[in-house]
Image: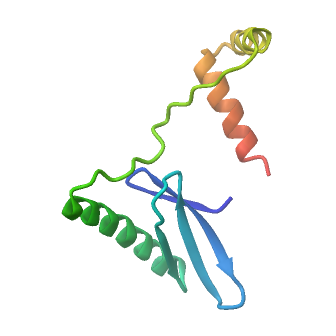
Amino acid sequence: MNSMTYKGYFAKINFDERDNIFWGKVIGIKDSITFEGETVKQLTEDFYNAIDHYLVDCKQEGRTPEKPYSGKLTLRMPPNIHAEIASAAAHAGKSLNKWVTDTLDNAVHSH
């Protein structure tokens, strides 16, 4: 997936062949933040400006900006799967958190 991050906000990047333009949308929050550019440089600048504008706008309106992903993820799973994951982590010489993070990172970037 093509993506960008700025100030903890994560955006998915797309390319519109018809209009020959890159465009992006911040994901992980309910508010809608979009941006665009004809070049990667323009896209990046517009992304940064969109986030900065969002934060200023929230402050001026007296509302708390939605927070991007915190990095914490709570999972519920059957105890036997939890035990198998813990066993795999121990076998790999990693903490449970490190093993799960590495495994998910590999899964996300394998395509």
Q: Residue at x 80, y 52 (%)?
A: 111
Q: Residue at x 72, y 86 (%)?
A: 17
Q: Is residue 40 left or right of residue 103?
A: left
In which quadrant of the rendered view does residue 93 lie? top right
Figure quadrant of residue 25: bottom right
User: Which quadrant is the N terminus positioned in?
Assistant: bottom right
Counting from the top left corner in percent of width and height, residue 107 is at 75, 40
- Image coordinates for residue 59, horizontal then vertical, percent: 22, 59
Q: Is residue 45 left or right of residue 19?
A: left
Task: Identify which residue, 63 or 75, lies in the foreground.
Answer: 63
Q: Is residue 17 above or below residue 32?
A: below
Check the image and report above or below for 98 versus 86.
Answer: below
Q: Position of residue 7 (x, y in %)?
A: 37, 54
Q: How is the image coloured?
A: rainbow
- Furthest-bottom residue in this view: 19
Q: Nearer the viewer, residue 8 or 68?
A: 68
How many numbered marks are there?
Answer: 0
Q: Residue at x 65, y 89 (%)?
A: 20
Q: Is 28 left or right of 52, judged from the image as shown?
A: right
Identity of the residue drawn at 60% across and 23% down: 98
Residue 41 placement (x, y as % from top left): 47, 78
Q: Quadrant of residue 91?
A: top right
In front of the other: 32 or 14: 32
Residue closest to the eye, 97 or 51: 51
